[in-house]
Amino acid sequence: MTDGAIRAHRDGIVTACSIVANGAAFDDAIEKLRGVPSLEAGVHLTLVEEKPLTCIRFPRKYTSFVPLYLARVISIGAIERELRAQIEKVLATGLRVTHLNGHQHLHVLPRIFEVVKKLASEYLIDYVRIVNEGAGVVRASGAPLGGGTPEARTTPARRVAMSALSFLGRRARAGGRGRPPLHNDRTIGVAEAGRLRDVIALFDRVTEGVTELVTHPGVAVRGYDHWDYDWDDETRALCDPRLRGELAKRGIELVAPSVIRSGQ
């Protein structure tokens, strides 16, 4: 995915990318990102689908992880040790880490988010993403509402998941308002994950404050076919030459996480 992120940064509007510390392409990603210092790096905290760095074993799928976690079968202490190891692995490369977010957005779960905030403060990482797509991104039938896009059409189960994530994100943000780490006010693009083709349509959902565009640019590779994501199409969408003009016309400032952190 690193190649897509770099292209979408150089030719498009991507300002930051997030590294999977326990991913198979970690070393390759670090080497490439060192050559693009203007593309800010963060840690994509990953508790499922990749092998943990610590000796703990987590369920591979989030659909198994979440119920076991909520039942307190999975120790919050084990989660903290794993997330700490992931952050430290990225920091050990010498790259500046400006932000944190989570694979499958599991970092916004109760108690896990408290751990993430604690680690962010400890390692001086002042920006953590929360998910808040806002009410009414899609109708119950799956047809897009105003400001939505056809790519957001999804299953009832995914719509329930999106609503739950947004609720957890809003609650997490309210609990830490005004104190580091800082959070975005809302997200756009999460509902369109892997199917984003019209970025301009998303700009209609940008409101006052900090809106994070969550995207998945990449180059299709073996091993990730099960995601059924159009990595290449998303990269092309983010490189649309009209985007910067549309941002300027709407008075939307394009910034990176470190700028949000410093309050500039």
Image (cartoon, rainbow, N blue to C red):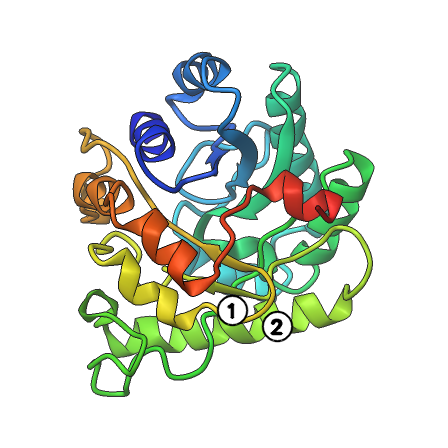
| Residue named by callout 2 | 170
Q: Position of residue 195 (x, y in %)?
A: 21, 56
| Residue 110 higher or lower than 234, as above or below | below
| Residue type pointed to by label 2 | Arg
In the image: residue 3, left or right of residue 121: left
- Residue shown at 48%/58% (left/top)? 252
| Residue type pointed to by label 1 | Asn
Which dot marks residue 21?
none
Name the quadrant containing residue 173: bottom right
In the image: residue 180, left or right of residue 19: right
In front of the other: 15 or 49: 15
Name the quadrant containing residue 31: top left
Which dot marks residue 132?
1
- Residue shown at 56%/41% (left/top)? 256
Quadrant (top left/top right/bottom left/bottom right) for the N terminus: top left
In front of the other: 172 or 211: 211
Q: Position of residue 16 (x, y in %)?
A: 49, 37
Q: Are marks 2 and 1 in contact (CB under 8 Å)?
A: yes
Cα distance between the residues tagged 2 and 1: 6 Å
